[in-house]
Amino acid sequence: MVEFVIGAGALIVAALAVKILSSESARPEIEIRHKPFPVEWRSILE
């Protein structure tokens, strides 16, 4: 019974984390994060 409660709690926490990440305008942050990476990789490769 305790294991079930812990498992359910972990699933709820994971679901809430996904909702929070998706609701906090994640798309612009992802775009901003991905723009610098190609520049960094180019400088590393050069």
Image (tube, grey):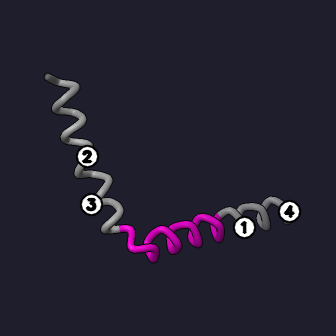
Residue 31 percent location from the top left of the image:
27, 60
Residue on which disc 3 sits: 31
| Mark sitting earlier along the chain (2/4) | 4
Q: Is residue 15 shown in magenta? A: yes
Residue nearer the viewer, 34 or 18: 34
Label 1 SS = helix
Q: Quarter holding the C terminus?
A: top left
Residue 17 percent location from the top left of the image:
56, 67
Query: Badges 1 and 4: C-beta atoms under 8 Å apart?
Result: no
Q: What is the CA distance from the residue labelled 1 to the residue labelled 4?
A: 10 Å
| Mark sitting earlier along the chain (1/3) | 1
Foreground label between 1 and 2: 2
Amino acid type, label 2: Pro
Query: Residue at image x 59%, y 72%?
Result: 16
Residue on which disc 2 sits: 36
Q: What is the CA distance from the residue labelled 1 to the residue labelled 2?
A: 37 Å
Q: Which numbered circle lies on residue 2? A: 4
Q: Which residues are magenta?
A: 11-26
